Structure formats: C-alpha cells, structure tokens
Image (cartoon, rainbow, N blue to C red):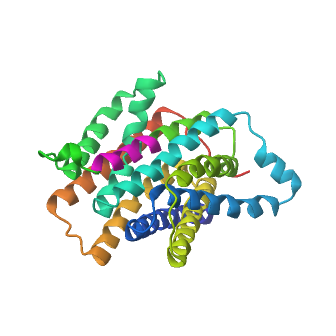
Amino acid sequence: MKNLSSLGMSLALISALAYAIQTAIVKHISGQISTPMLVFIQSTVCFILILPLILAKGRRFALQTLRTAHPIIHFFRTIFSLGISYFLFYAVKFIPLVDAVLLANTAPLLVPIIGFLFMSRGLNHRLWLPLIIGFLGIIFILKPDSQVFSSASFLALGAGICMATSIIFISEAKEDSGLTRAFYYFIFSVPISALGALWFWSPITLSVFAVAIGIGILFFIVQLTLVYAVKYTHVQIVSTLYLSNILFAAIISVIIWHTPVTASILAGILLTIAGAVFTIRAQATAIKPVKLEAK
C-alpha cells in the first residue's frame, strides 16, 4: 500500500512537470500558430491516443468505459475544460510563464466560491482564512496599477475560473471512472475545438505542426498520470502535489527566459500555493473526496 501511495505521488509530480513543460512550449511557439488551431490539434492527438488504451483491455472494458449516466455534464465540463486551454494559451503569449500558470492554478480557491454562488453549495467557514491568503497572492501577481484592466493576467485568471467550474462538473459525475471522464472530454473536445480552428485556420510549417503534436502528447500525459495518481493515493494529496507545476514553471522561466523572480512574484507564489493547499485541506475535512480512479 505504501509503495502504491508513493507511485501515486510520483505520478502527480510527473503530471505537474508535464503541464509546466507543455505550457512553456506553448509560449515558445505562440506566435507561429493560432490558439484555436493548437487546442484542436491537442484534442485530436489526445483522442487518438486514448482509443488504443481503452480498446486494448477488451470489449467489456471498453463498454464499461463508454457507459455513463451524465453525457450532458461531460459536455459542459468539456466546454469549460477547453476554456482553460484557450485562456491560458492566449495569456501566456503576453505575460510571464509563472504568472500565467499560477493564475490558472487558482482553481482550488475558486471552487468553493463558484459552488456557493451558482450551485447553492454551502460555504465552509473554515475556508475564509485560506481564501484571503490565496487572493492576497493573486493581488501580488496581478500587481494592480493603471494598466491592470488591459492586462492578459485576467485571461489567465479566466483559465482558473474555467478549471474550477470544470472540477465542479466532474464532481457531479462522480460515479464515472477517470478514463470515462477523459474519454468523453476528448471525444467532445475534437468537434467543438474544430469549429474555432476552422475559423482561425492558417498555414503552418511542418516543424510547428510537429511541436503542436508534441504539446498534445504532453497534455495526454498530464491527464493520464492524474487519472492513475488518484487511483493509487488520496485525491487531496494529488491536488496538493499538482500545485508544484507553479514551481516547475518558475524554474523553467528562470532557465529559458531568465525571468527575474522578484520579491512580489515570490510572495504571490507562496501565498497563492499556501491558500490553495489550506483550501484543499479544509474542503477535504468537510466533504468526502471524489474518487477519480480508473475502473
């Protein structure tokens, strides 16, 4: 059991690292391919990769994976999950990698607020202090000034809102396995993202296309390692460890773009991560965690 828990934690860290690397590559090629095209290629690659994974385990397993009582929930979850990529990929063109990744990872802070405002969910009063700490971190990252309303930082924060809403929809389909959720996400995301890709389609070089496929493979690794991480260890531990993608993004930013880690940015990172971790822990003690394991 201890070995399985260690495996789950390792998979969570691999997922976080893959996500940071993926976003860094997106930033690198963002001027050479439109965001809708990139999201479409990412979705298509993931759908192609998940099919043999499901079919290889036999017809019975495939039918189990395809069975769901929540197709509408999966559809709307897909809309918001695609929103994460659209907002984040566009934002990362204009703001530092670590800022974009951190603001996209505000989801743990936003889940209880969105649930309270739009889904009539009670708000655990033990969340107030963690939320205040987390949002102080966001303020340090946004650095409010006279130009704040034109900042792409709010697009990255939009990715966090989409991520939080997606998590809420996932929790509404808790009977489905992680692979079931991944399958419906990918199968819905292909036609939906195709509409935007067709509208913004433009010629790209073979090398950029190859990099876009690599981004899709990395995103598939992110999703698959998360599915199996929560199979082998507690979802609260996975959620906490996954926040390490912010630290990975900071390291990549320093190495690749020589981004200075100012006191303001460091304070924002530490406060936001602390707020998110304490929020995850407070919610875990209030409600039974949703199991996302693959069947």
Measured along the vertical axis of the image, is residue 258 above or below residue 139? below
Residue 63 on image: x %, y %: 83, 48
| Residue 216 visible in the current orientation | yes
| Residue 281 at least partly seen | no
- The magenta span reads 153-163
Of residues 4 and 181, the one drawn nearer to the viewer in this rendering: 181
Q: Main secondary structure of the magenta part?
A: helix
Residue under the image location 15 percent in, 47 percent down:
147
- For image coordinates 61% across by 49% down, the residue present is 189
Left or right: 203 as drawn, with respect to 3: left
Does the stretch in magenta take in 118?
no
Hey, which residue is sitting farthest top in the picture?
120
Q: How many numbered marks appear?
A: 0
Is 187 drawn above or below residue 253 in the view shown?
above
Q: Position of residue 105 (x, y in %)?
A: 39, 51
Instruction: Give the percent coordinates (x, y) of residue 223.
Output: 58, 57
